[in-house]
Image (tube, grey):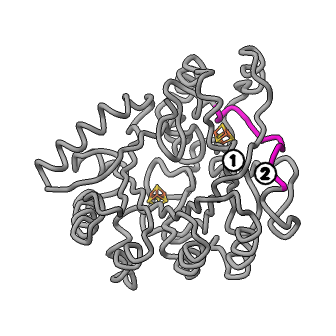
Amino acid sequence: MAEKTALLPILNRAPAADFQGTLRQHGLGELRRREVTTLQINVGKLCNQACHHCHVEAGPKRTEIMPAKVAERLMTLLAATPSIHTVDITGGAPELNANFRTLVSESRRMGKHVIDRCNLTVLFEPGQEMLAEFLAENQVEITASLPCYTESNVDQQRGKGAFEKSIRALGVLNAIGYGRGTGLTLNLVYNPLGASLPPPQQKLEDDYKTQLRENFAIEFDRLFTITNMPIKRFAEFLVREGKHEAYMALLTNHFNPATVDGLMCRDLVSIGWDGRIYDCDFNQMLDLETPSGKTIWEIESFAELEEKSIATDGHCFGCTAGAGSSCGGSLQ
Ligand code: SF4
Ligand code: SF4
């Protein structure tokens, strides 16, 4: 698929839905970071897939890849920030980055919990033959995208053959103990195919468990439902379908003030492949840097970002609609 659709205006930003104004209307102050407990590292846009909804616009031809000097600096800052207990590695397909295994091993050596945001099909890429074993040896939690339990829906969103490969990959992970109560955690991620909010997470998790167990003998731990953010490829899809305004109205009309306390940006920092600092992965994809504008070369610890303001815009309504949304699923 072409990275940009020439016929469409390129929507890098959601329209001017006033997120800060909405917070004020509900008696809530501007968003500020609390103690930093999660370091989310986006190692770049290289991916073996090019999914229609991808907010990263990742793909096999992308060249934005985290170099070793950035990965090394991140490990120095991690060591200097004891409040961080979780390192969450994403991409693209993070496993394709040459520094991925060092980031995992070093973080584990420091006693941190590590999450790999895995697209599953990467397990069958050349050079990744021992990936599953590496992840298991390092007790890495796997959070894997599987936007439906039916082949047609998954292939529609992620490309032909993606479902069959994903099921095969889940079988490989189950076989070495993932998702089977052995302490190796395997979570799945659902996002809607179209312009709607996700259904209730627990009910959908029950459906996934039944369907995947009965049809494919697949087991997993938790299902996370995630709202599609109105940015990048998904925004282009909305415009193409004439649904962009209606989707933004859906998000803003379902603003739920009870989700604000748990927004993921309040406890994490997000790092881009080039070492720039963001408040979350979505802001990263919009080039919306954290208000201080600092990079990893200008701080000595991530604790320096505590109490600091968080950059917000209209897309933030994607995190506060309905039950709320984060990289760890719904917020309520
Ligand atoms: S697998 Fe993930 S990172 Fe890769 S293109 Fe699909 S959504 Fe984007
Ligand atoms: S997109 Fe969500 S996580 Fe990111 S800054 Fe906005 S509310 Fe926070």
| Residue farthest to the bottom, as pictured | 127
Q: For residue 203, what is the image quadrant?
A: top left
Q: Is residue 315 magenta?
A: yes
Q: Which mark is residue 162?
A: none
Q: Which residue is mark 1?
A: 283
Does the Cβ of the disc 2 residue fall within 8 Å of ligand 2?
no
Which residue is located at x 84 percent, y 70 percent? Answer: 297
Within-10-Å neighbours for mark 2: few <14, some 14–19, many 20+: many
Read off the magenta span: 304-316
| Lower position in the chain sequence, tag 2 or tag 1 | 1
221 vs 238: above or below = below
The image shows residue 178 at horizontal and vertical percentages of 30, 64
In the image, 245 versus 310, the foreground residue is 310
The image shows residue 314 at horizontal and vertical percentages of 69, 31
Which residue is located at x 41 percent, y 43 percent? Answer: 224
What residue type is disc 1 on? Asn
What residue type is disc 2 on? Glu
Q: Mark 2 falls on what kind of element? A: loop
Q: Are marks 2 and 1 in contact (CB under 8 Å)?
A: yes
266 vs 295: above or below = above
Within-10-Å neighbours for mark 1: few <14, some 14–19, many 20+: many
In the image, 224 versus 8, the foreground residue is 224
Q: Which residue is mark 2?
A: 289
